[in-house]
Amino acid sequence: MRQNTPGYVFYWLKNIIEQIDRPAFLENFARDPIANSIAVVVLIFMIVSVIAVVISFLKDSHQNKRLWPKWSVPVLAVIGIGVAGYLMYVEWTGTDAVCGPTGDCNAVQESPYAKLFGILPVGLLGVAGYATILVAWLLAEFGPPGLKNIFNLLVWGMAWFGVAFSIYLTFLEPFVIGATCMWCITSAILITLILIASTGPAKEFLKVEEDELDDEELAES
């Protein structure tokens, strides 16, 4: 019995090691390492962009007001409506999505995360979000002058919400679902670019508010 003890212990430890699986998120990632790696790169891009926007916003508002052409936001929003509209079509009709050379859009669309609260299709939410951003931009450019800056700030606020939600979804794809939808990745990039492009006008609005408060304080003093 003593002679067999080392062999028995080795066999027992070997069985335990074999039963210890890799963390679930690594297993999910390994299902499609190429597409999921692209999702991770985009996720990093979004997080870095958010940090850059915060740093830019905290800097002097006299600098870096409008580095992007003012038509950038509507163009990106229209493209976003097209991308989200296609996903909405796939969700509603149940047809297979055209995924391209890499990724598995259909696996993502069939996952429980394709519907918010299990009811609202994410594609529909995307169409509504991009359309609202487009309308807000149009009102900022062609609406009542007194509300122009408020609508610019509204565009920026909706972009923030869209980016936060896209970061959440982009994280789910490689690490929870185990599949990446390139249409979703495209949408994530678009909303991040809208956030970046709309930061300058939002800074202008807040700078105007700050200057008005300073003038009022000087007048009172």
Image (cartoon, rainbow, N blue to C red):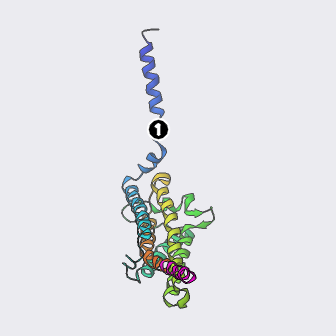
Q: Which one is nearer the viewer's eye here, 160 or 182?
A: 160
Residue 193 spot, x, y in % from top left: 41, 72
Residue 123 spot, x, y in % from top left: 53, 70
Among all residues in the image, which is located at the extreme front?
221
Residue 43 spot, x, y in % from top left: 42, 60
Q: Is residue 208 located in the magenta-colored stretch of the structure?
A: yes
Query: What crowding class fits label 1: few (fewer than 14 Cα within 10 Å), some (14-19), or many (20 or more)?
Result: few
> Given the image, on which type of amino acid does mark 1 rest?
Asp
Which stretch did the figure color magenta? 207-221
Q: Is residue 6 located in the magenta-colored stretch of the structure?
A: no
Which residue is depicted at the point 48% across and 45% down? Answer: 24
Dot 1: element = loop
Which residue is depicted at the point 48% across and 33% down? Answer: 19
Q: Which one is nearer the viewer's eye here, 207 or 105?
A: 207
Most common SS among magenta residues: helix
Rendered view: 56 above or below 10: below
Q: Which residue is mark 1?
A: 21
Quadrant assignment, res 183: bottom left
Among all residues in the image, which is located at the extreme top?
2
Disc tally is 1
Quadrant assignment, res 115: bottom right
